[in-house]
Amino acid sequence: MKRVLVTGAGGYIGTVLTPMLLDSGYRVRAVDRFFFGRDLLAADEGLEVVVEDCRKLTASHFEGVDAVIDLAAISNDPSSEFFEHATYQINHEARVRCARLARAAGAERYVLPSSCSIYGFQQGDVVADENTPPKPLTHYARANAMAERDILPLAAADFCVVALRQATVFGLSPRMRFDLAINGMTYGAWSTGRLPLMRDGSQWRPMLHVRDAARAQIFALEAASAAVNGQTFNVGSGDNTYQIGPLGDLVAENVPRNVEVAWYGEPDHRSYRVAFGKIEALGFRVKWNAIDGVAEICEALARGAVEKTAKTITLDWYRQLAHWHGVIREVELHGGILDI
Ligand SMILES: NC(=O)c1ccc[n+]([C@@H]2O[C@H](COP(=O)([O-])OP(=O)(O)OC[C@H]3O[C@@H](n4cnc5c(N)ncnc54)[C@H](O)[C@@H]3O)[C@@H](O)[C@H]2O)c1
């Protein structure tokens, strides 16, 4: 039975991926600081939980590890703009270190979950494939590009390295995120009947269901090394590539109440489309679309299984943690506040 070390296992993708790996017969060493809570992974005899910062991993964490899926990251543009230094430390430096430690420990494979955002916003009708030069425009995208640049060359005959450039993810997860496009639109429409959409709606965005994102990581784990080693793959599908206006209409039609679209902002001409033929040629196909995601989120909201809190908006939660860390440091003495 193979052991996979998953960093960021307590996150939006990680809490979906971990049970999927366990169901597929893998053992999982879940490494995370668990910023979003320690109760999101169900106990399992194949699961080992390690509470650690990925910047502090040592050789011992990789003992007996066959493969690594390195999800831990500051996971969106706004959080990376706010926590710039930590973003380069975590998303770039710690991942390079993690890949080197994995290789030194004899692991056979390392999967880097990168992002289509490294293409930036391409002009006109360009459909970016893996050979299109990246145009990273944000710290988040730049840190991903730097991680790819420094980790892919570690590929060797006995160390398979695969980078997955994932489209924007959507759908239900134990660590729910309402700061992702489809999830946020669904929440707005479901809770207020008003679906906020940025003008003019013609901009293109590729999307990927969170269970398909997890399936793609497992696909990258299991694909023949000769077919994937040292390579990058866009992950998503043409069918899940939407223009924002029609996507808003689709979300509105699938939320069980009357919904009106509330346009805002100046026309946003930024637009990008991505080609997914390379991973499809290896046999990977997505299974879920936006309608599936909207339906499952509405159902979960209706039965109270999920709600919008600061924890579901990544930047809000990190800012709150940073704020309270400062407050507590100021008033804490002798290891406590009132009880010491
Ligand atoms: N969700 C998307 O749309 C999307 C799209 C493309 C790529 N990605 C990438 O996939 C990965 C996972 O994204 P997600 O949506 O699950 O994000 P997330 O924020 O939900 O999860 C990140 C996890 O990493 C952990 N973490 C952060 N810093 C850490 C540190 N220093 N040490 C240990 N753990 C730490 C957090 O506690 C969290 O559990 C990220 O690398 C992200 O950039 C996500």
Image (cartoon, rainbow, N blue to C red):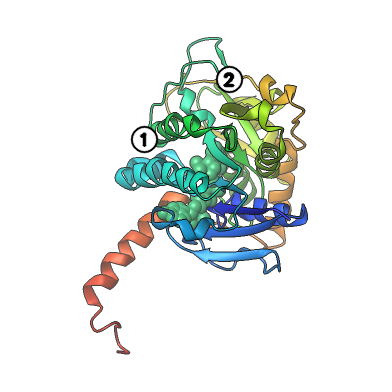
Q: From the top left corner, tell me how far across and down residue 196 is, in percent.
A: 54, 37
Q: From the top left corner, tell me how far across and down residue 184 is, in percent.
A: 56, 44
Which three-letter amino acid code belongs to the residue tagged 1? Answer: His
Mark 2 = which residue? Answer: 273
Task: Return the mark for residue 139.
Answer: 1
Q: Between 214 and 172, which is closer to the camera in this rendering?
A: 214
> What residue is shown at x 72% (from left), y 57% (from top)?
22
Image-based side of 328 in relation to 195, left or right: left
Q: From the top left corner, tell me how far across and down residue 45 is, in percent.
A: 71, 69
Q: Quadrant of residue 18?
A: bottom right
> What residue is shown at x 60% (from left), y 52% (from top)?
14
Task: Return the mark for residue 93.
Answer: none
Which three-letter amino acid code belongs to the residue tagged 2? Answer: Arg
Local crowd size for mark 2, using a 10 Å CA cut-off: few (<14), some (14–19), many (≥20): many
Is residue 270 visible in the rendered structure shown here? yes
Q: Of callouts 1 and 2, which one flags the residue occurring earlier in the amino acid sequence?
A: 1
